[in-house]
């Protein structure tokens, strides 16, 4: 085996080790542990069934506990990316660690591959790579969550925006990382995006509202105007006779 073959084998081994380390870091289910310590049992059995900060808040009702979960999930994302940033100037180790830590968070092997939503760990990765992009993504996530009350859609859009913003930097591989993660998030939360969220948007459909108003107007005419017209016609007939 020549030098090239040895180099390829070493590279594959390093990528495998980096993937395993990143996945193990990402698969630490802080929300699951915190909810159990607070006496709420298995958080996956109630609420959204996820292990992230949103479901911690939904199940426990504790904002400090949800904030702690969000912070810890974001820190594990930042830590996994910080490890290769301090050792290697290349983007490849960062991509491997970043991808594997998010994958570990979404699909932890310890919890039958049922993990969190991905918002906190993705924001942690983005902030560690470029803090202005991380802050902008966080602001977008908060705004969409506040207005649409959908953390799933907020996470998806914030991740997509981070991918676009990284595309304007000198690190196109970071843009590719977040684009791939956007696709994975879309597949993971497809049921939420096509189910309750779609129903909520349909309720706000102006065409449906217009149809409802038309039905109400017809009903009002039947109840109010017809008896009134009948009374008028009867009184007119009496006068003639």
Image (spheres, grey):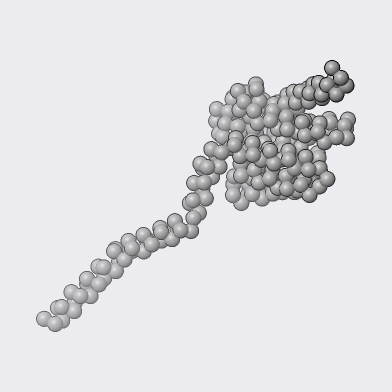
Left or right of residue 54: residue 194: left
The image shows residue 232, relative to residue 96, as above or below, that is below
Question: In this orientation, which residue lies closer to the viewer: 138 or 169?
Answer: 169
Q: Residue at x 61, y 28 (%)?
A: 114
- Please identify the quadrant where the C terminus is shown: bottom left
The image shows residue 117, relative to residue 112, as above or below, that is below
In the image as oriented, which residue stretches furthest toward the left? Answer: 241
Instruction: Mark yes or no: residue 49 visible.
Output: yes
Residue 125, by quadrant, is top right
Instruction: Mark yes or no: residue 123 visible.
Output: no
- Please identify the quadrant where the N terminus is shown: top right
Q: Residue at x 56, y 38 (%)?
A: 190
Give percent across and percent down for residue 170: 83, 45
In the image as oriented, which residue stretches furthest toward the front? Answer: 2
Q: Residue at x 61, y 51 (%)?
A: 147
Left or right of residue 174: residue 160: left
In the image as oriented, which residue stretches furthest toward the top? Answer: 1
Tell me how many marks there are. Answer: 0
Give percent across and percent down for residue 35: 64, 28
Give percent across and percent down for residue 194: 52, 42
Question: In this orientation, which residue lies closer to the viewer: 238 or 210?
Answer: 210
In the image as oriented, which residue stretches furthest toward the bottom? Answer: 240
Give percent across and percent down for residue 156: 64, 43
Question: In this orientation, which residue lies closer to the viewer: 236 or 1?
Answer: 1
Q: Residue at x 81, y 21 (%)?
A: 9
């Amino acid at each position: 085996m020549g030098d090239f073959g040895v180099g390829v084998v070493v590279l594959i081994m390093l990528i495998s080790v980096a993937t395993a380390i990143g996945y193990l870091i990402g698969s630490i289910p802080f929300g699951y542990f915190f909810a159990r310590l607070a006496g709420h049992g298995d958080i996956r059995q109630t609420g959204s069934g996820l292990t992230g900060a949103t479901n911690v808040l939904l199940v426990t009702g504790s904002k400090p506990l949800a904030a702690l979960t969000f912070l810890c999930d974001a820190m594990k994302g930042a830590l996994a990316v910080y490890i290769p940033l301090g050792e290697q100037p290349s983007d490849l180790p960062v991509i491997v660690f970043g991808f594997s830590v998010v994958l570990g968070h979404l699909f932890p092997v310890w919890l039958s591959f049922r993990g969190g939503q991905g918002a906190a760990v993705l924001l942690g990765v983005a902030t560690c790579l470029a803090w202005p992009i991380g802050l902008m993504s966080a602001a977008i996530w908060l705004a969409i969550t506040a207005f649409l009350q959908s953390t799933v859609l907020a996470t998806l859009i914030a991740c997509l925006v981070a991918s676009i913003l990284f595309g304007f930097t000198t690190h196109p591989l970071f843009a590719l990382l977040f684009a791939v993660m956007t696709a994975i998030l879309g597949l993971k939360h497809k049921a939420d995006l096509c189910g309750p969220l779609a129903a909520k948007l349909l309720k706000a459909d102006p065409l449906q509202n217009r149809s409802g108003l038309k039905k109400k107007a017809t009903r009002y005419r039947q109840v109010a105007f017809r008896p009134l017209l009948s009374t008028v016609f009867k009184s007119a007939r009496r006068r003639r006779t």
